[in-house]
Image: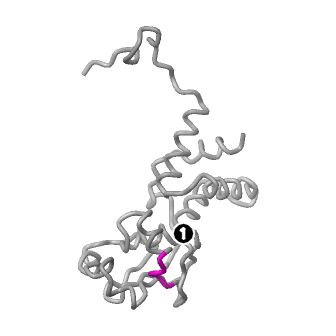
Amino acid sequence: MVRKPYVPGPRHTKRRHSLSEYGKELIEKQKLKNWYNLKEGQFRNYVVKILKAKGKIKDAAAFLIKTLESRLDNVIFRLGFAVSRSSARKMISHGHFLVNGKPNNISSFLVKKGDVIAVKERSAGKGLFKNLQTTLKKYNPPSWLTLKVEKLEGEVVGEPNVEEAAPPAEISSIFEFYSK
């Protein structure tokens, strides 16, 4: 396929414009925001909070990824209980999970090292979780999580890192976008 130096359409739109710095930063921000299935306000709050504490935090990019990976909806996705982050959010809002033995229906809840996330016994028999044990036997969670397939529970045993999360965006440009 030959790529022409102009866009399709009327003759007066002949040139392809290169993206501005702002446009590149905006695209990177949208990539990460959509990757974690967050709304603009939620995402901005996380980034602005880190920007305010810039002197106290050594590696802002790693801290942002650590925070986003520690959200309950992401942990449930990483444990393999849900096929996507959006379905994990829905499962949480419907009250299917316990965090340290207590019901939790807040997807933005930040889990800490030592927290145990389990499927409620009442929910374990439902259609969402019926065949989950057979699927999870083949699944390998990230190193900072442990999974007990027979009990349908997982534990946070460490902290998430940037290498394992492998975000699809350049995080430094996200901070540049919000620092303007």
For residue 96: magenta?
Answer: yes
Q: Is residue 8 left or right of residue 72?
A: left
Q: Is residue 53 left or right of residue 39?
A: right
Q: Main secondary structure of the magenta part?
A: loop
For residue 11: magenta?
Answer: no
Estimate the x, y position of residue 8 in percent, counting from the top left.
37, 18
Q: Quadrant of the C terminus?
A: top right
The residue that appears at 53% across and 42% down in the rendered structure is 28
Residue 90 image-quadrant placement:
bottom left
Q: Which residues are magenta?
A: 94-98
Q: Is residue 139 left or right of residue 44?
A: left
Estimate the x, y position of residue 155 in percent, counting from the top left.
46, 82
Q: Secondary structure at mark 1?
A: loop
Q: Is residue 114 visible?
A: no
State the count of labels: 1
Estimate the x, y position of residue 152 in percent, counting from the top left.
36, 84
Q: Residues within 10 Å of mark 1 (few under 14, many from 20)?
A: many
The residue that appears at 53% across and 85% down in the rendered structure is 103
Q: Is residue 70 left or right of residue 50?
A: left
Amino acid carrying label 1: it is Ser
Up the image or down, 82 lies above or below 130; here it is: above
